[in-house]
Amino acid sequence: MSGSGQAGPAAAGAVGTTAPEVPLLEVADLKTYYQVRRGLTERVARTPQMWVHAVDGVSFRLARGEMMALVGESGCGKTTTAQTILGMVKPTSGSIRLNGTDVAKLGERQLRPLRRTLQMIYQDPYESLDPRFRVRESVEEPMLVHGIGSSRADREKLAVEALERAGLAPARVYLDRFPHELSGGQRQRVAIAAALVLGPDLLLADEPVSMLDVSVRAGVLTLLDTLRRDGDMGILMITHDLSTAARFADRIAVMYLGRIVEHGPASDVVRNPQHPYTKALLSVVPKRDPRERAAPQILKGETPNPIEVPSGCRFHPRCPVAVERCQVEDPQLRLPAAATSPAHQAACLLV
Amino acid sequence: MSLLEVSGLHVWFEPPHAAEVHAVQGVSFALDPGERFGLVGESGCGKTTTILALMGLLPPNASVAGEVLINGQNILAGGEDSVQAYRWKDVAMVFQGAMNALNPVKKVGWQIAEPMAFHDIAQGAAARKRAGELLELVGIPAAAGERYPHEFSGGMRQRAAIAMALACEPKILLADEPTTALDVMVQAQILELLTGLSRNLGLALVLVTHDLPVVAQVCERAAVMYAGEIVEAGPTEMLYHAPRHPYTRLLFAATPDLYGQDAVISIPGTPPRLDSELPGCPFRARCDVPLERCAGEHPELRLVGPGHQAACHRNELVEAS
Amino acid sequence: MTLPLQDPLLSAEGQGQPSSPRRGFLRTVLRERKAAVVGLAIIAFFVVLSIVAPYIAPHSVTEPSCAVYAPPSASHWLGCDDGGIDMLSLLMVGGRISMIVGFAATLVAMIIGGGVGILSGYFGGWTDISLMRVTDYLLVIPDLVLMIVIADLWGASLFHVIIVIGILEWTSTARIIRAQVMSVRERAYVKRARGMGSGNFRIVWRHILPQVGPLLIANTVLTIAIAIYLETALAFLGLEDPTAVTWGTILEHAFERTAISSGAWWAIVPAGFAIAAVIVGCFLFGQAVEDALNPRLKVAHLSLRPWRLRPLVGRGPDAL
């Protein structure tokens, strides 16, 4: 299934430890800036070009068999990070190594064959399938594009396999249906099957369950979990839902204004948060149990504009424990003093 | 006598070229001033239709039966005409995606003052002053009323929508998924605002959402809806710690908790179609503990504890033993 | 781990939808909008008439068969023109040519307009900017004036008329198609196809064209109406080959040769009526399809009739 033929055990995936083989995905100091459009008058007046710092120096590694969650609020850059990795958006600088090959610099032509290794599951199950295509055609489309399957019957067999792996069984019942005849959860499974049929090594899942009913979310998330174990795939999940990340991902990376501010094993990040932003975020997640009335630490205001990134630590204007130093120094990710795991990192001057 | 009493509310829709859909099937609940009540359920369960019916905001192909009493007066008695007198003045609504429903070419302050003028509460300068006060009440500086919606962030627009709903000083506020499209931090701010309004102004709040933890944190009482019916209602504490309907129990089990240890489950199957009468319990096909009688006999809401009702045949087994 | 999933058709979400989104559209339009049926019927009638005209025309269109401006009679249902030629035959044969010119010109316009719209909408960027500049220049030029100049330069012939109409009419189609393509391009399934590595041609052919198709049809039909009208106008202004027999030339001859003052209404009214009928038919059908494609035009919620109150029957109110 994997083009590079790596058959070693899944690496521990902990940032900082040296994996025996090339990691599935290695992102190093990725930056993606968008130009702010200027009108004619501004160009003539030579006002300085402003940039949206959507992704402002993101680094992490993902190994096979691992699920990592990129968590954050809107504007933090998690979606742009995924889009850049997928190659839909050109990065401004930095590298993205997929099985060792830097894909950041590749053009569309060269990227195309690599798209088999890397697939994305989209947020909206109601929009991600062409309403005019039957399930059969949606799942066969990737095969036709990449020349998989020698005949119609062969492709149908592969489609049935993929659909069953995605939990739609008996698959033959679903082959001739149209998307509008399926529920949200079923549509999402069809999208997953269409991705699986190419045998990808890495799956990017952008809010895969946020538009599904609560009662079907666990099914799709458990499916992703199974796929990464059995299929030895790596999954990068983008989500704003910390509870989902905590329960299903191995590792969590919390993003704020284009940077990762905290990163580590899921249980560590959630039970022993080090960065003030993570602590505040966790405190405002509503609990299921009505008796648990935690004291939420509600931050003032909203996430600032990624065009004007605050000086020093980008979180300092809203930080409840900021000191003078924080306005000047920009903290890097490092091991906090109170961390209970060597893989846990936070970008804060005070930990 | 409660402030709001909904009694046996039914809503049907007649889509063109298709069978009639029975979207709301006999919903009843009551609300006192200052109470926060949650109406929970997944897509298609009828919760939004229920509160739209409370405001009489249904499309022409809808028909309604039942009573909605505000301070003892049945506002539905005369159809659309009788509801109009109460709309926005006694009961107001914050719609789903309200933040996107603000008029982009009118200043925010003007939009809040508009219903005041329309319902003869205040006019001109007095209305604008009141609009400013309402903005302050929801946590936005009054001067911001001079700005346009696109200059507001998502959270601020939602606050503005709440201010608009409060324009005529209603006693009941219906909020339909008020925080669904918002970030978790902004959601906390809005929920804090709504809780504060209900405590300080004595506003009765009906919070409609699919997000159980939100209801658990904000509402003292809640009702769980499935296939157009209320299947369980009572104090939110009891719904979590002692659920008496399998759907309630499974729904909580399907909601991941940050620090929980038990596995997050999913409920197999899909809700039933609402365009045909189903015998028996609507949840039977997806229930994990069905009984023989569930297939043919429809369970009615029964009292299972103080202020706690559930519609499940299993509760009778408990009583019997 | 596979979960037991119910038959999807039991899902409440699939209620009330046509079973096939592909074939259903035109049938739905015809079923729901009577105007569309009427329009299509009119167009079909004239198309059929055009095809069989040479075979069923009662008299010759080149040889006179009755007196100058003879009124309608049993043998000549619509009388004769100033050359003694049967009007009914003229109308039928003229209709054939008018329809051919209309359809041919529309074909040219559709190919250019559809192509420009798709390229512009799909690729965006400089392709879009440059193509739209060209479109803007052509949109601004007054049609009739340009046609007069070209007819003057190249001479009057039916072929020139087809080309001129085609070249000038593609612009509005291009704009409309471009807008639709731009919106379809942003749909999640198109982005998914690109992310999957699908090539541009494939995406346009399989995902965008089917969505744009119905709009193209609506626009084509409306353009046919405009093309026929323009052909009439050109002929009336004397810019068409005067020996050609089209509805336009029929009207032009009648006007030139004092049919009105002679009281020979049959030389004018039938042709005018025929033109009007085809245009109305095209508009009825084209507008109905366009309306069906535009979901925002559904104004059911603005109906004056509010929701109804029903007496309570069946299960009584549940006590709380």
Image (cartoon, rainbow, N blue to C red):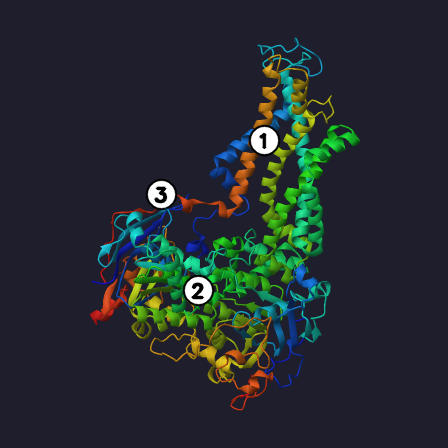
Residue type at mark 3: give it. Answer: Arg
Kind of element beneath mark 2? helix
Please name which of the two marks, 2 or 3, marks the residue nearer to the observer. 2
Please name which of the two marks, 2 or 1, marks the residue nearer to the observer. 2
The answer to whether residue C44 shows anywhere in this view is: no
**Residue under mark 1: which chain is it in?**
C
User: Viewer-proximal residue, A98 or C221?
Assistant: C221
Q: Name the residue located 63 percent from the left edge and 67 percent from the top edge.
A: A86
Mark 2 packing: few (<14 Cα in 10 Å), some, or many (20+)?
Answer: many
Residue type at mark 1: give it. Answer: Ile
Residue type at mark 2: give it. Answer: Gln
Position of residue A297 relative to residue A176, above or below, is: below
Q: Residue A151 falls in which quadrant of the image?
A: bottom right
Disc sitting over residue C279 in the figure: 1
Position of residue B190 relative to residue C200, above or below, is: below
Q: Name the residue located 50 percent from the left edge and 75 percent from the top edge.
A: A245
Mark 1 packing: few (<14 Cα in 10 Å), some, or many (20+)?
Answer: many
Is C298 on the left or on the right of A34, as rendered?
left
Residue where numbered disc 3 is placed: C305
Q: CA distance from mark 2 to mark 3?
A: 31 Å
User: Viewer-proximal residue, C88 or A6?
Assistant: C88
Kind of element beneath mark 3? loop
